[in-house]
Image: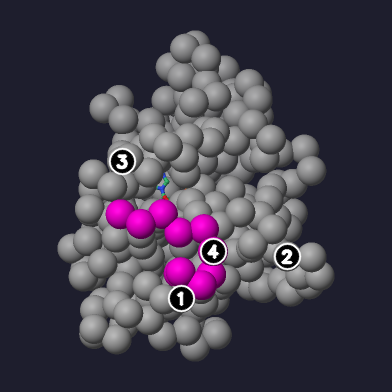
Amino acid sequence: MQTIRHFDPLKKMVNTLHGEGKRLALVPTMGALHAGHMALVTQAKALADHVIVSIFVNPIQFGPNEDLGRYPRQEVQDAALLNEAGVAALWLPDVATMYPQGFATSVSVARLGDGLCGAARPGHFDGVATVVAKLLTQVRPNLAVFGEKDWQQLAIIRRMVQDLNLDIEIVGAPIVRDGDGLALSSRNAYLSAEERSAALALPYGLQAAATQIEAGASVEPALDQAKQAILGAGFASVDYVALVDAASLEPLQTLDRQARILGAARIGTTRLIDNFPVRSKK
Ligand code: AMP
């Protein structure tokens, strides 16, 4: 596996592979890789001839009081994992390469980024859309794989790629969970042992509400019950628990189409997110 830090060698490699008619997949990450990321790599390998993984802790998607400074960084370990997984290249630009002095452009996907995580993290999805647009332009993959763990992010990227006519297939990969049901996340490393066990209330609460709504329960009371269960387990606050249209992310009061239940809550100093499908029988 090549580790590439600058545009010239990246361009050279991508030109060579495209020249040979190879199908290229990109898996964008912020590193601190776990089995969730590696599942994206496996899916990418199945769909393309060569996989490029990017690791870039993107400063412009972090708010001023967020965890940019303490976000876990373990490049050597990550590179070893990717090498073992048969990845062709690790794209590892630094902040000055990605955002040189004078950088002035922002990509903003209207509406989809305003609510849910966007409400608690103003500017976050502009940061995400901007860096993903740049990564897709830099690597020019045929397809890119993103996790359903970040459902709102996936919906925003799909919209952006469609709106900008980027000829790149966006593939969503299912959420990988620990044996007990907690979604894998680089941020789980922040949790104390006590917080780690209380954190299960997030997936359990969301899944219980999803099951009730699928069985015909009223939406608002089911969402409230999930919030109370999450708070009761020891979360400090719930940013939101919402039932939304799976693609447009519009809030739903009734289950009249394919939907998703999404939640975000804070435990100690850590903010966790999760989501589940809610299947309409209609
Ligand atoms: P991150 O490094 O957190 O920015 O995540 C990079 C990519 O991995 C994103 O597309 C995430 O949605 C995806 N991802 C992170 N955790 C998981 C998980 N537990 N299951 C599936 N995909 C994940």
Q: Secondary structure at mark 4?
A: loop
Q: Earlier in the sequence, mark 2 or mark 3?
A: 3
The residue where tag 4 is placed is 6
- Front residue of 153/243: it is 153
Residue 243 x %, y %: 50, 53
Q: Earlier in the sequence, mark 1 or mark 3?
A: 1
Residue 194 x %, y %: 49, 11
Q: Residues within 10 Å of mark 1 (few under 14, many from 20)?
A: some
Position of the C terminus by quadrant: bottom left
Q: Earlier in the sequence, mark 4 or mark 3?
A: 4
Above-or-below relation of 16 to 101: below
Q: Residue at coordinates 57% horizontally, 17% vertically from top-left?
A: 234
- Front residue of 92/41: it is 92
Q: Is mark 3 within 8 Å of ligand 1?
A: no
Left or right placement of residue 219 versus residue 60 in this view: left
- Front residue of 160/204: it is 160
Q: Residue at coordinates 39% horizontally, 40% vertically from top-left?
A: 78
Residue 81, label in figure: 3
The residue where tag 1 is placed is 11
Cα distance between the residues tagged 4 and 1 = 9 Å
Q: Nearer the viewer, mark 2 or mark 4?
A: 4
Bounds of the magenta segment? 1-10
- The image quarter containing residue 90 is bottom left
Cα distance between the residues tagged 1 and 3 = 24 Å
Residue 100, label in figure: 2
Above-or-below relation of 204 to 102: above
Query: CB of mark 2 within 8 Å of CB of mark 1?
Result: no
Residue 37: in magenta span: no
Cα distance between the residues tagged 2 and 1 = 18 Å
Q: Earlier in the sequence, mark 2 or mark 4?
A: 4
Query: CB of mark 4 within 8 Å of CB of mark 3?
Result: no
